[in-house]
Image (cartoon, rainbow, N blue to C red):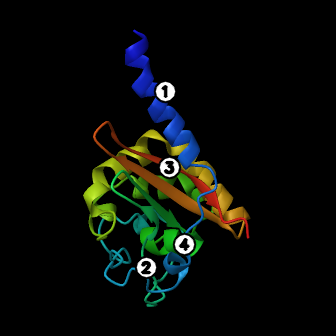
Amino acid sequence: MKRALLPVLALSGLLALSACGTEPSESSRSEGAGAGASAPNVEGSEGSGNDEGGATVEGSGATEETVTVAYEDDRRSVFTLDLAQVEDFTGRAVEEDAFADIVDLLAEESRWTDDAETGPYASLIATAFSRESESANGALYAITEADDARLRVQVVHNGHANVAHVGVEHSNG
């Protein structure tokens, strides 16, 4: 029985420690760092949620990346989105009365599949937004309130587990 708990405790500890204060690298903060990744065309596309009467956001046409890769190795990938990236990615203005709709849009696997960085983990990420909608709502609230807050998607992909989690990250600076 004790041996069965050891991997569970180790994974829990790893997830808890990895969520503590990881700051995006300088190269991932600059515009165009992920030039190979293209934003999905959400403006005027079917299923974008824009027909529900919510506020929409027009794309800026900038070369800004869709999702920032904050960290990546052979066991874990961490993606972040700031307020503008969430608005561009979903086509919706991030306002408190639209949080549930935005989380539903982020739970669509096809949104993540179209991005070169998140495509391999699209199913895991979409499932995380469905399963962890309260965390996603909290993260959306945080990015509207604090300039240094970013929506954080952590994907664990190793021999023991393949899972994604949603949260918030502050750059503390």
In the depicted view, which residue is nearer to us: 68 or 91?
68
- Which is more N-terminal, label 1 or label 4? 1
- Which is more N-terminal, label 1 or label 3? 1
Disc 1 marks a residue whose amino acid type is: Leu
Tell me where residue 59 appears, x and y as whole percent.
45, 84
What residue is rendered at 55% in x and 60% in y? 151
Question: What is the C-alpha distance between the residues marked 2 and 3?
Answer: 19 Å
In front: label 3 or label 1:
1
Q: Which residue, given by chain and number where applicable, does mark 3 sit on?
A: 166
Q: Is residue 132 above or below residue 2?
A: below
- Which is more N-terminal, label 4 or label 2? 4
Q: Which residue, given by chain and number where applicable, does mark 2 sit on?
A: 65
The mark found on residue 25 in the picture is 4
Left/right of residue 151 with respect to residue 64 in the rendered view:
right
Question: What is the C-alpha distance between the residues marked 2 and 1?
Answer: 36 Å
What residue is rendered at 50% in x and 41% in y? 15
